[in-house]
Image (spheres, rainbow, N blue to C red):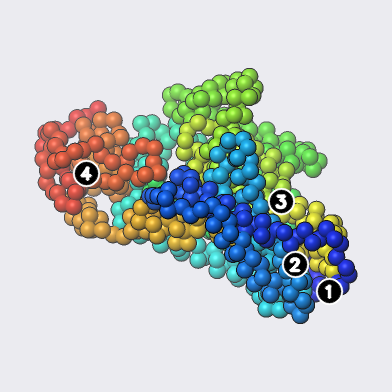
Amino acid sequence: MSLEMSGQPAVAAGRRRPLYSLAWYLVPPVAGIALGVGAYAVWCDDRAFLSLWHGGSIDPESIPDPWLLRGAGVAIATAVWVFAAQLLRGEGRLADGLRLAAPGFSGFLAILALNAVASYTGYELTYFSALAGVYGFAFFAAWLVAASLRTGEGKLWRLHEGIAKHAALIVAAAGIGYFALSWTLSMLQYRAVRISYHDCAGFDEMLWKTLHGQFMRASVWERSFLGQHFEFIHLLLLPVYVLWPGLPILMLTQSAGLASGVIPIYLLSKRKLGSRFVAVCFCVAYLFYAPMQYADKRLIYEIYLPETLAIPALLWVLYFLECGNMWGLLTAGFLAAACKEDMAMPVAMTGLVLIARRKWRWGFAIFVGGWTWFVASLLVIIPYFEGGQSHVMSYFSEMGGSARGVIATVFGNPIETLRHAFAFQRIDFMLMMLVPMGMLALLSPMTLLIFLPSIASNSLATWPPSARIVYHYHIALVPFAVGGAIFGAANLVKFLERKSLLWTGVPRSLRAGLVAVFAGVMVLAASAAGDVLYGKFPLSLNFYNPKSPAYWRHIYVQAPRAKFFVEKVLPTIPKDARVCASQYLATRFTHRATDYTYPNTPRGVERADYIVIEIDEPVNPSTVYSVSPVCEGEPFFPSFECILKEQGIYVFKRTDPRWEG
């Protein structure tokens, strides 16, 4: 039962505390030591330090003495403890407030645990101190809020009730706010000519050519796009695209689609946890969630990808699964699978859940249908259009490089498989996915089962970007982390409300509501803190770091080179021309006869009527491939004459007949 459903204040009991409860008084000072240890570990670890402040440098002589940091940590923790106790004491004694606030520091003990394991095993776990700090901060904030609400009175209680009363309106406003911010940033980046063509504007060109008789084709792919992925969700946008063709409308639909994810999250949270206040917390946490934001705005300057729509689709799958709405599940599952072939895997796994719930026919049909979709896509449809094996299998080169090879490696060499899956970078990746959602997804066996194939896919891939949240390979794991946190919180409520030792003086009618509030606030605080540390949106440190590729001036400001390109270069190129352009500039030529990317498209120069390149086009530090043209000094192309140059942008026009091949 939720807090707003019960409407009864908790009654503090004056019974004597057992002796072991005095141990809680040791937690805050030990947590202070943990803060000092964590700060020292991050300061001394180049990788950890640079993950928080890109481009920074560490002077070993400037690092304070470790015991000085530990002492400062204890002093800070003690001051915060006393301040929190004053807030929680109400009309009671300070000692009551100190005892009530002390357990809230427990989350910081994870820092000590990580460093202890690192000291005795040699594993590089000190790098995770920053994430442990995020978790500790979220745990403390959640404990403080839940402990304040147990009295059933005060300003925080009234705020809680006000949020619960207007929950739907708050969620709608938050979703609209995210949509407005996301699309505004997209349009600013579009205006600044800072959008990479690859895996982004190619979809704009594909829809444009589909409307003009070349179904699912774009110059970046030698054959049909179906040879890359069995993915067609963007074709459903054609009726809107006809009215407003171009990348802006695609960016708008992506921003709106991701923002709409708050709807299934709100409905699912309210259903599982019975609290509108907690539902608001989960919705806002989703909007702050850095992995979701990177799916929206990747760090490689790509800001549109149709498969991002699988995030809200899979969230709806979880909601309809919980409701038992089979036709809704089937519809949402179809839309998710249409986003990309591997999104059919979690849809298929929902069939096992239905079978366990004795819905045999639906479960068997969805399980077999989902896996048939995936296997047919990977082994039949994509190879047919590509003329060979799917390029996706190259992502598993160290695991066999083919479907048969991966299966043979997993079952024939399980030790090597586990070593690969639990390598440092993959643990780091999974923690960055789970910590901002309070690690609660690990408490939900059902969602772990549903998304097990997606987790395995990311864990076994040897393609480096698959283990980094700044790309898009984690899209299927966003619904796992968010939806799993909701189910995990519900399991936590069921478990903790029965533990009477934790609930001295709290009526049974309030226990479930307080645990739900604790989980909701923890997720919200962790998501916001994670966004600050490693996100890309305006709340993030990266957004304001001049040495970070996410720095706002690098991406969203229309520099003179962008004005020159838009005002002078674009009008110069005829609509029926074949254009070979460097990555950022090629994004704006998708509606010409053909749009080749320089220097990536084979024979693009030979086929082009015009070449448009930016010789100092920046290489994004987060990429594993170069998006810059291969030019040094003054570029020269035989059979072309330079007709325009300024701001590092050169426009060449063909003088000889072009190659036709």
The tag earlier along the polypeptide, 4 or 1, is: 1
What residue do we see at 69% from left, 75% from top?
Answer: 86
Camera-nearest label, 4 or 1: 1
Query: For the residues marked 3 and 4, what is the alpha-carbon distance in whole angstroms?
Result: 51 Å
- Specify which label sits upstream in the sequence, 2 or 3: 2
Q: Judge the density around disc 1: few (<14), some (14-19), many (≥20) Cα neighbours within 10 Å.
A: few
Q: Read off the residue under disc 3.
A: 488
Tell me the number on the disc at residue 430.
none
Q: Earlier in the sequence, mark 2 or mark 1?
A: 1
Provide the secondary structure element on which disc 3 rests.
Answer: helix
Looking at the rendered image, the disc whose residue lies closer to the viewer, 2 or 1, is 2
Q: Secondary structure at mark 4?
A: loop
Residue annotated with mark 2:
100
Question: Is label 2 in a helix, a strand or a loop?
Answer: helix
Q: Is residue 514 visible?
A: yes
Pick the residue in front: 128 or 552.
128
**Near-viewer residue (238 or 451):** 451
Residue 242 seen in this snapshot: no
Position in image of residue 40 (x %, y %): 52, 51
Q: Is residue 304 left or right of residue 507?
A: left
Say what amino acid the circle numbered 2 marks.
Answer: Leu
Q: Nearer the viewer, residue 612 or 23?
A: 23
**CA gap, disc 2 and disc 3:** 25 Å
Residue at image mark 4: 615
Name the one closer to the observer, 119 or 551: 119
Position of 617 compared to 320: left or right? left
Give the distance between the C-alpha atoms of the residues marked 3 and 1, in whole angstroms: 28 Å
The label nearer to you, 4 versus 2, is 2
Does dot 1 land on a helix, a strand or a loop? loop
Instruction: Identify the mark nearer the N-term, 3 or 1.
Output: 1
- Number of residues whose C-alpha sits closer than 10 Å to that of mark 3, classed few (under 14), some (14–19) or many (20 or more): many
Estimate the spatial distance between the alpha carbons at disc 4 and disc 1, rounded to whole Å: 71 Å
